[in-house]
Image: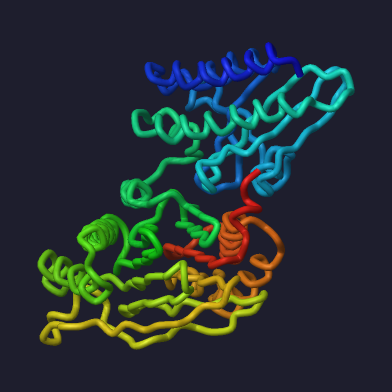
């Protein structure tokens, strides 16, 4: 490709960044189309994944009048979303490309691009320019989502309850990764979750992770979870250690609810340099260690009371910390009781055994970590005929698996 054309592509991509400074969020689809045309495309469409991660919705027209959807499990666009591969479909006179929209390793949707074709392979410079466009659009989706409800309207296929709204605003991105560690979570049911939450942060060599399950349902449970997560973040950012963090959350819940409400929690720290995992279990289901497609251990550890109750027994000066050295390639699965206690109408539990078998099988299948989590969620929903009877939250942590490099298209 000649130098003038390469410069034209670079200029087209630079213009995206310039226009973004004064762009209204609802102008993003038009910006994608205009930039695509400058790169030689006849059509460029952004598709966002819905909250259940079962459909892809085009960012076109009025947000409340979306007609067309593509199945994540039954379309080429869905295969791009699941596999994180750039896919091309050749047709007479045109070539259709599907590119993943990623914020780091967080899957937002896919970008559809149609370019004229004479049957010859697409030039590598054109493909690289389109991949760069997909990256820029993903970053703009994330940053502009802070200023608008526009993208949320497209993603939601049903009305979200107030407790669920509070919980989703509380969450970090579902997936994050570096070359050494990958974290991926899910929160279900998407539109009616109440008291479950998770959080994580990577500070230098230390990955902080936590899963919470507030007692009860609805708004009260959501308020409990919000207080617990906010106190967790405050303690973490004040450089408190694990016992002091647990004590701070316990004190905050007791001060607000006087021992009448509580939160079970698993608070952990993974040293991503050495693989040593340390945790406190406050009345919570044990995490599991997966190694080479098998669950090799349940991390029971020393028990503690749920957070918010310790004042009833005279207070807790210390919370016991347990420790487990991981091997390279190990995965830790943290969960709330809504996962393994999911049951059918006749009372058959999903169960930890079924969960462990499914998680180990999917994790060893070569699928990207967020896709493993999505499939776990779908398996639970199938088990309960589409309706979860309790919140179900999972957090998957991988150490030195090599998966992060494979998730970058």
How many marks overall? 0
Task: State the residue in front, 378 or 24.
Answer: 24
Vertical placement of residue 115 versus 349, above or below: above
Above or below, 386 relative to 251: above
- Taking the spot 56% from the left edge, 22% from the top edge, the residue there is 60
Residue 388 at x, y percent in the picture = 49, 61
Residue 89 visible, this orientation: yes
Q: Position of residue 122 (x, y in %)?
A: 80, 26
Q: Quadrant of residue 211?
A: bottom left
Q: Is residue 256 above or below residue 17?
A: below
Residue at 34% from the left image edge and 29% from the top image edge: 147
Q: Nearer the viewer, residue 363 or 237?
A: 237
Q: Is residue 289 left or right of residue 118?
A: left
Quadrant (top left/top right/bottom left/bottom right) for the C terminus: top right
Q: Name the colour scheme.
A: rainbow
Splitting the image into 4 quarters, where does residue 243 fall?
bottom left
The image position of residue 12, as x and y in percent, is 58, 16
The x and y percentages for residue 278 are 38, 77
Residue nearer the viewer, 312 or 362:
362
Please tell me which residue is depicted at 60% across the width and 30% down the height of the picture. 132
Name the residue rendered at 85%, 25% in the picture: 91
Residue 382 visible? The answer is no
Extreme residue toward the front, this view: 3
Where's the N terminus, which quadrant? top right
Q: Quadrant of residue 366?
A: bottom right
């Amino acid at each position: 490709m000649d130098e003038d054309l390469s410069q034209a592509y670079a200029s087209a991509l630079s213009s995206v960044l310039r226009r973004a400074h004064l762009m209204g969020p609802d102008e993003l689809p038009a910006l994608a189309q205009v930039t695509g045309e400058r790169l030689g495309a006849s059509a460029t469409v952004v598709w966002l994944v819905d909250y259940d991660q079962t459909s892809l919705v085009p960012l076109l027209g009025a947000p409340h009048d979306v007609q067309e959807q593509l199945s994540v499990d039954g379309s080429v666009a869905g295969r791009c979303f699941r596999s994180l591969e750039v896919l091309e479909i050749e047709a007479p006179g045109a070539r259709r490309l599907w590119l993943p929209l990623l914020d780091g390793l967080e899957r937002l949707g896919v970008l559809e691009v149609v370019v004229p074709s004479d049957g010859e392979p697409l030039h590598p410079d054109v493909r690289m320019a389109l991949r760069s466009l997909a990256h820029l659009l993903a970053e703009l989706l994330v940053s502009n989502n802070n200023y608008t409800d526009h993208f949320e309207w497209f993603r939601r296929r049903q009305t979200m309850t107030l407790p669920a709204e509070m919980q989703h605003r509380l969450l970090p991105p579902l997936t994050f990764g570096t070359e050494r560690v990958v974290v991926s979570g899910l929160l279900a049911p998407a539109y009616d979750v109440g008291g479950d939450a998770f959080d994580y942060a990577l500070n230098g060599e230390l990955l902080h992770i936590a899963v919470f399950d507030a007692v009860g349902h609805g708004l009260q449970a959501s308020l409990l979870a919000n207080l617990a997560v906010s106190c967790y973040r405050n303690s973490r950012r004040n450089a408190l250690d694990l016992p002091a963090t647990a004590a701070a959350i316990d004190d905050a819940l007791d001060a607000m609810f006087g021992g009448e409400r509580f939160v079970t929690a698993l608070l952990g720290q993974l040293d991503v340099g050495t693989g040593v995992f340390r945790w406190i279990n406050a009345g919570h289901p044990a995490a599991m260690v997966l190694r080479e497609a098998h669950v090799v251990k349940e991390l029971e550890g020393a028990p503690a009371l749920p957070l918010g109750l310790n004042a009833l027994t005279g207070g807790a000066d210390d919370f016991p910390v347990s420790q487990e050295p991981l091997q390279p390639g190990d995965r830790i699965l943290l969960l709330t009781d809504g996962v393994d206690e999911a049951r059918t109408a006749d009372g058959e539990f999903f169960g930890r055994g079924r969960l462990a078998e499914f998680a180990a099988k999917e994790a060893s299948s070569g699928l990207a970590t967020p896709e493993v989590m999505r499939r776990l969620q779908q398996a639970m929903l199938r088990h309960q005929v589409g309706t979860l009877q309790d919140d179900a939250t999972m957090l998957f942590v991988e150490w030195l698996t090599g998966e992060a490099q494979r998730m970058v298209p």
